[in-house]
Image: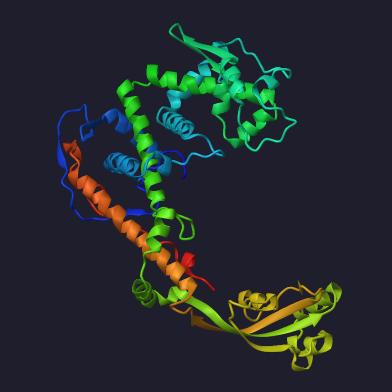
Amino acid sequence: MSKGLWRMSLLATLIGMSSAHAKISYDITNNTQAATVAGISISPAVLDVMYKVSSAKKPELSRATVLNSLIENQLMGQYGLKRFGKENIVEDNKVSFKPAILEEQEFRAIMQVAFAKPLSEALKKFGGKLDSVLSDESPIKATEWDTYLPSNKIMQLEFALSPTGRVAAAKRVMVKYRFDDKTSGAITLAEVYDSQNVQGRDKIHSREGDYVSAQARELVVNRYIEYWVKTASGLTAADIASIKQAITNKTYHDGFASYIGIAADIHDDVPYVKSLAAKVTFPEIKDYYNKHKNEFKRIEKVNAKHITVTDEKTANIVADALKKGGKFEDLARQYSIANDKDKGGDLGWIIHDLKNPTWLTTLAFVQPPNIPSRPVRTPNDQWEILLVSEKDEGYQAVDSDSVRYVAGQTIARQKAANEYRQIRMDLIKKADIHIQKSFQGQSNTLEGDVVIAAPSEEDHHHH
């Protein structure tokens, strides 16, 4: 799942469609709420922040569209969480940053866009790196590492602190900070370690003390940004919590869409789609095949000539002669050692045979027509130059494995998309949604249906 700066579009593949089915009340007249969804309030301040960040990347977005996305992410995200569980819709592996760290990064990125000028000036006040608020910086000494890390003389299957090392790292203070008389704290080695992805953990296990110290300072900067937002941005604690929840909702929504396969490439291994594809019947495949036959075109046979020589030097001589306009048949008769040299290297028609392909037929079917191939070394240490003069197109058989796979995957994804659309509409219909009256008539992206784009044509096309 992508984790970039807030993207207000539903998904890259979703396009708003006009079709007013949902019942939404545009009846809020006070200035303290932009909307409420099932009793949960979205304040104008939260909408302002999200609109500022969203429109910075997409100026064409309206405040109504951004508000609709906040509502939709809440409904769809929470539905996906309840139905499939967090472990299935939120990616959590040993390579990337932990989900909580990614959401913290997202929050800070939003704040740095929404409050770019005042936050930048506040950071400059402390010399950019907050030097004036730091104290008791204590880099890791070379003799300390064994206290926290497994021995570097033993190969580790994965990067991890030992149980005793984690306890020690949680007590090892890297640096202390004080932002004001009421706000102070410390950064520990364990906190630095837990903020890393696999590359960062690799540096720590490589015992790079300077890297750890720099990361400790970066965590102080991160904490200062959160401190500034709480004390100087004008956002209330409820607003901040609402923005963080909006980020989480977006994570859940994207994860739900990915889990059921509507945000994945046709060749991605999606268990949910795989389970739907296994239930696709042959009549469904046949119907799809007949309606989309051009997606199953393939080269049935090619007419080709070749020149076989014994060494690379001779192959390059022939290739140069062809570039200078030499006739392929004449050069075959002059240089080729193959039995068909007297016929100008004519191979005739090569039939498409998936069950018994050779390196020569494989090359023939990918070689553009009327362009001699570069010299290719063969498995028996000879050299070949191939020329395809004609290609004859046909269609894959409707009962072939390839058609079954492509059509089955596409039909399954269509079913997943239809399921998604129905869930979305049902949730919006049933939810108790109230929106500020001023937004009425400005946008129908929430009330309307959505269409989910199919995988691209080239994803389907197989030769």
**Near-viewer residue (194 or 376):** 194
Residue 10, horizontal then vertical, whole percent: 35, 47
Residue found at x 52% / y 82%: 393
Query: What residue appears at the point 68 percent right and 23 percent down from the top-left corner?
Result: 210
Q: Image check: 216 left or right of 31?
A: right
Residue 414 in the image: state x and y as whole percent: 35, 61
Residue 211 picture location, percent across and down:
65, 26
- Residue placed at 24% from the left, 31% from the top? 40
- Work out whether 120 lies above or below 21: above
Can residue 426 be spotted in the picture? yes
Q: What colour scheme governs how the chains and residues are painted in the rendered image of this protein? A: rainbow
The relative height of residue 351 versus residue 17 in the rendered view (above or below) is: below
Which of the 4 image quadrants contains residue 309? bottom right
At 15% from the left and 40% from the top, the residue drawn is 25
Residue 319 figure quarter: bottom right
Which residue, as the protein is rendered here, is positioned at the far bottom?
342
Query: Which residue is farthest front?
Result: 163
Is residue 121 something that shows in the picture? no
* For residue 282, above or below residue 308: above
User: In which quadrant of the rendered view does residue 78 lie?
Assistant: top left
Nearer-the-camera pick, 406 or 151: 151
Q: Give the x, y percent position of residue 13.
A: 38, 54
Residue extending furthest toward the top: 181
Quadrant of image for the C terminus: bottom right
Using the image, determine if residue 253 lies above or below residue 413.
above
